Image (cartoon, rainbow, N blue to C red):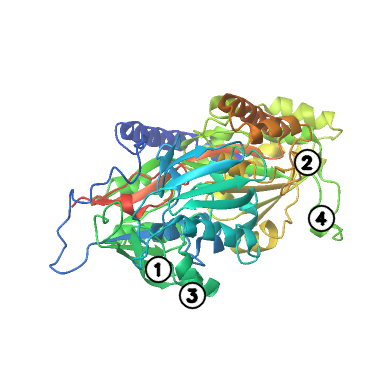
């Protein structure tokens, strides 16, 4: 309990920090930082307004963004990472996207849509939209993208499994396409939108000309930015698309620089070498606010922190005696004791101090999430009851062992050490393994070798589609997900969730019931949904969307 005791000695300092952060958030409530504009994230941009004068005549006006990761592929379905997609998406458009506040669908290439029947979703495309090579987008391009994902190999198209709900597609005319699903499927909109990955619409003619490897290196989209230069793991430079169908971008060039370390990203911002920084560490908030020419802003996001308990060994590791064993967390009383042992507000404060506890499957605000699974009601902290549950499970204090894997980097390491102290305080014996990011990903996460507990945080994984990603939509059974599972008594609820295409109220009621079932089963233990701290120059105005907290260069405005 050493780390937690040290934390308590710093209680006064922490309270001061939290008050300062809360004051900052309260002040920002009057502006866009915490109240994003729910309107179309592109339609509110007037390219003719605030057109800046370049610093020197003839020089292009450039915005530089510091980003954690760069793209591996420029073909949307060949890359799966959220942050690389934030770069890729600037060259492409989607059929539709989620609004800034995450509450409704906003048209992009699809100007309208309707359900023809329980299986058929019809989309009407904008006319006159051009790819970067001047060729016109048609429904054949849309069909070609999804056909190659459906028919291509998983090892090439990482998103292959995410689109198997589609049975076939029918092009009615150049600007009308039908998607026909295998069965009634309520999440079709989520899966065809930017909320999924790999959904940027590509050019059939360009693909036929350059092939899968060529598209991997040479993007051809309809988006507001055209790739000018690129060095993997270093930078991506875009130039404005002057013929963009919604109006040319407000400035000339958009540069993404790959800078993995948060401290280095902030240093580059302070030095004036970048304009916008995502995921600034909370301890840099006051420093940036006190400096001339830069500022820090908290923005709500759908980034969730979760503990993932394991119930059974993964099928790939049944021959490994260290992994093929009985897990303490297979007992639902132990999983409940874990959640009751942790104070989610304390953990949130260690990570930055802005956000709310959550439980279950989903981020908020999508109304599919149960209202009691977000906010104060989602913090079930009760250490006395946790001790009772451990005893009811048959363990004396110190007997119930939890092998716990986490990242050593900030703030994961600090959050995990506090969790370790909280769990040991109620009677668990915790073996905490703090690993560097590469080791954690390659040796634990990807090969599915976590043991009793693993911690992770993700952006964009708490929407209704990704929340049900591992639930079988053909049999309506809860197949085991990595690394735990789902309740085994929810087939009827799943059936209602996935098939209520023509009954929205029944769909919402069933999804909220499903969200609570998963929360109570605790194969995923939600901790908190955090806001993200952004750093930016005063010359920049930008309000990121709540869904994904992504970087849309078209919406960044230069105001100097």
**x, y percentage for residue 404?**
70, 49
Give residue 329's mark.
Answer: 2
- Which is closer to the viewer, label 1 or label 3? 3
* Residue linked to disc 4: 315
Q: Tag 3 or tag 2, which sits nearer the N-term? A: 3
Q: How many marks?
A: 4
Q: Nearer the viewer, residue 18 or 169?
A: 169
Q: Which residue is located at x 72 percent, y 44 percent?
A: 472
**x, y percentage for residue 355?**
48, 36
Q: Is residue 533 visible?
A: yes
Q: Is residue 384 left or right of residue 73?
A: right
* Residue linked to disc 1: 235
Q: Which residue is located at x 57 percent, y 31 percent?
A: 369
* Residue linked to disc 3: 210
Q: Is residue 447 above or below residue 59?
A: above
Crowding around mark 3 (Cα neighbors within 10 Å: few <14, some 14 to 19, many 20+) is: few
Crowding around mark 2 (Cα neighbors within 10 Å: few <14, some 14 to 19, many 20+) is: many
């Amino acid at each position: 309990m050493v780390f937690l005791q040290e934390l308590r000695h710093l209680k006064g300092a922490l309270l001061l920090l939290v008050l300062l952060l809360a004051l900052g958030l309260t002040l920002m409530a009057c502006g866009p930082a915490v109240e994003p504009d729910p309107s179309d994230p592109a339609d509110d941009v007037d390219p003719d307004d605030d057109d800046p004068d370049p610093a020197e005549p003839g020089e292009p006006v450039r915005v530089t963004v510091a980003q954690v990761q760069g793209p591996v592929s420029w073909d949307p379905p060949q890359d799966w990472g959220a942050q690389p997609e934030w770069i890729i998406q600037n060259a492409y458009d989607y059929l539709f996207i989620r609004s800034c506040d995450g509450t409704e669908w906003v048209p992009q290439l699809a100007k309208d849509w309707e359900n023809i029947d329980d299986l058929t979703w019809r989309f009407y495309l904008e006319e006159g939209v051009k790819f970067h090579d001047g060729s016109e987008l048609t429904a054949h391009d849309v069909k070609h993208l999804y056909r190659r994902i459906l028919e291509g190999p998983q090892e090439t198209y990482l998103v292959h499994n995410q689109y198997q709900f589609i049975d076939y597609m029918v092009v009615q005319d150049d600007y009308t396409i039908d998607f026909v699903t295998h069965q009634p499927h309520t999440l079709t909109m989520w899966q065809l939108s930017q909320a999924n990955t790999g959904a940027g619409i590509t050019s059939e003619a360009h693909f036929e000309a350059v092939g899968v490897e060529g598209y991997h290196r040479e993007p051809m989209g309809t988006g507001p930015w055209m790739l000018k230069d690129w060095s993997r793991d270093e930078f991506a430079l875009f130039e404005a698309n002057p013929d963009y169908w919604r109006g040319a971008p407000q400035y000339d060039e958009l540069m993404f620089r790959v800078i993995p370390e948060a401290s280095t990203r902030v240093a580059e911002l302070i030095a004036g070498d970048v304009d916008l920084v995502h995921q600034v560490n909370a301890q840099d908030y006051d420093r940036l606010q006190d400096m001339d020419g830069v500022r820090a802003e908290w923005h709500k996001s759908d980034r969730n922190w979760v503990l993932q308990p394991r119930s059974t060994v993964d099928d790939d590791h049944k021959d490994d005696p260290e992994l093929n064993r009985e897990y303490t967390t297979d007992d639902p009383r132990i999983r409940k004791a874990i959640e009751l042992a942790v104070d989610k507000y304390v953990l949130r404060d260690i990570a930055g101090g802005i956000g709310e506890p959550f439980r279950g499957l989903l981020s908020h605000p999508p109304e599919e999430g149960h209202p009691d699974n977000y906010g104060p009601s989602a913090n079930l902290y009760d250490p006395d009851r946790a001790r009772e549950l451990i005893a009811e499970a048959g363990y004396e204090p110190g007997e119930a062992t939890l092998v716990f894997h986490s990242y050593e980097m900030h703030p994961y390491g600090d959050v995990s050490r506090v969790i370790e102290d909280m769990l040991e305080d109620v009677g668990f014996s915790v073996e905490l393994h703090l690993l560097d990011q590469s080791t954690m990903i390659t040796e634990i996460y990807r090969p599915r070798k976590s043991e009793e507990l693993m911690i992770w945080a993700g952006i964009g994984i708490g929407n209704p589609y990704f929340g049900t990603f591992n639930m079988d939509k053909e049999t309506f059974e809860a197949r085991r997900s990595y690394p735990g599972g789902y309740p085994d008594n929810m087939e009827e609820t799943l059936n209602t969730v996935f098939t209520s295409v023509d009954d929205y109220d029944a769909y919402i009621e069933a999804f909220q019931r499903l969200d609570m079932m998963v929360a109570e089963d605790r194969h995923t233990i939600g901790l908190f949904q955090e806001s993200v701290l952004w750093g930016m120059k005063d010359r920049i105005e930008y309000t990121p969307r709540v869904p994904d907290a992504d970087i849309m260069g078209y919406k960044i405005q230069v105001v100097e």
